[in-house]
Image (spheres, grey):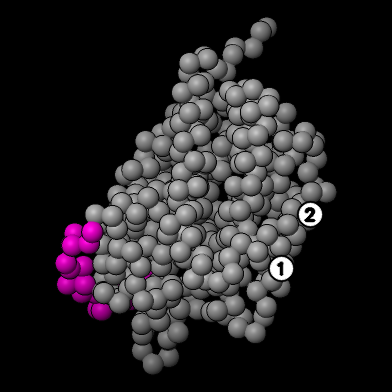
Amino acid sequence: MRIDKGQISSRLLLFSVACFLQSSALLTAFLTEITRQDSWIVVLLGAIVYLPFLWLLGTLMAMFPEQNLIQILDEVYGPVLGKILGLAYLWFFLTLSSVNLTDLADFTKGTIMFRTPAPAMSAVCILVSAIAVRKGIKLVTKFSPLFVIVAIVTMTLSTFLVINQFKLENFLPIFTLPAKSYFQGTHIIATIPFGEMVVYLMIHPNVKFSRREIRKSLFWGFAVGGLTLWSTTLRDIGVLGNTVDLFTVPSLITFRLVQVGPSISRTEILFAIILIMLLFYKITLLYYVAVLTISQLFKIRSYNHLVLVVGSLMITYGLTLYPSPQKQAASVQETVPVIWTVFEILIPTLTFILAKIRKLPKAKEA
């Protein structure tokens, strides 16, 4: 049963994946605390490590072109275990949505709207996102090409404007940290944000694609988004050097250093707006996936009446997740990657193996 009848092109899927990954600029702060000037290497390693699982994601989509993740779990594991795993993924999607919503509200409050309570900004975001979620996947992904292009242009322009402050010695020394730091950093990047692409298993039945096209769209979207994240990390280290791990949002400080004559400064506001735009897109997509998952699990044909209820749940849940930014940072660095590995790598891998053993999906009888 396909609840949302809307369809998007494989090209739009490419831009959606790229935009989804570009929104993770806030993540670099959690990474630079661990791997410092070698963070650019770790981003590259994380992308390489995730490539086999990206192939796995595309393969599952090609094997089950008409079934989303919840339907795949039901077919592979049976109705009972499949439902249990589906409920676990619902928790996963709701947690992802709530964490990103809280990040957006806190970032906006800390950079632009200092006097506005964070929950109020979360509520505004949900109300706007709810419009797109109600309309379905076509509206949710419609503006992703624009967001991707704006993000790339902004990143390129900012790099050009701070190139005079770029120092090669800021990347030295290389590979002097403990091996544990590189392993931990690679694990973080491979699971957050790359592994979060597992959410597209809920969306792919709404994409017009051939087997070749789906893998191509995933790969190029991953390449564009990953390259943007890597380039951003490279730029921040080149400018900030060994102080990069001291800042909550290194890119914000890099933009703050941009000076174009006496009349153009404070360009960090531009970065803040772009990041808010990208985070808004990611939240809207995750919000849509969470609503779709509930509808699929409970066989609800129309999810419109669920949208605001789920949005309210996301706001409330987000307020209870972490008591402080320090607790969140510790969780992202130590706990979250381990839990996320189960949902993003272990279960999809086991699902693929069992589907091959059981020769699923079964051919439909004429």
Quarter-wise, where is residue 301 in the image? top right
| Residue 146 percent coordinates (x, y) | 53, 57
Report crowding for label 1: few under 14, some 14 to 19, many 20 or more residues within 10 A (C-alpha). Answer: few
Mark closer to the chain start, 1 or 2 = 1
Q: CA distance from mark 1 to mark 2?
A: 14 Å
Q: Residue 115: in sight, yes or no?
A: yes
Farthest-out residue, top: 366
Disc marking residue 309: 2
The residue at the point 43 percent across, 57 percent down is 334
Q: Amino acid at mark 1?
A: Val
| Residue 131 percent coordinates (x, y) | 74, 56
Quarter-wise, where is residue 75 in the image? top right
| Residue 48 percent coordinates (x, y) | 31, 44
58 lies above or below 193: above
Q: Which residue is mark 1?
A: 124
The residue closer to the viewer here, 246 or 326, is 326
The residue closer to the viewer here, 324 or 165, is 324
| Residue 354 percent coordinates (x, y) | 50, 21
Q: Amino acid at mark 2?
A: Val
The residue at the point 24 percent across, 78 percent down is 164
Image quadrant where one finds the C terminus: top right
The residue at the point 40 percent across, 54 percent down is 188
- SS class of the residue under badge 2? helix
The residue at the point 78 percent across, 44 percent down is 303
Magenta region, residue range = 157-178
Report crowding for label 2: few under 14, some 14 to 19, many 20 or more residues within 10 A (C-alpha). Answer: few
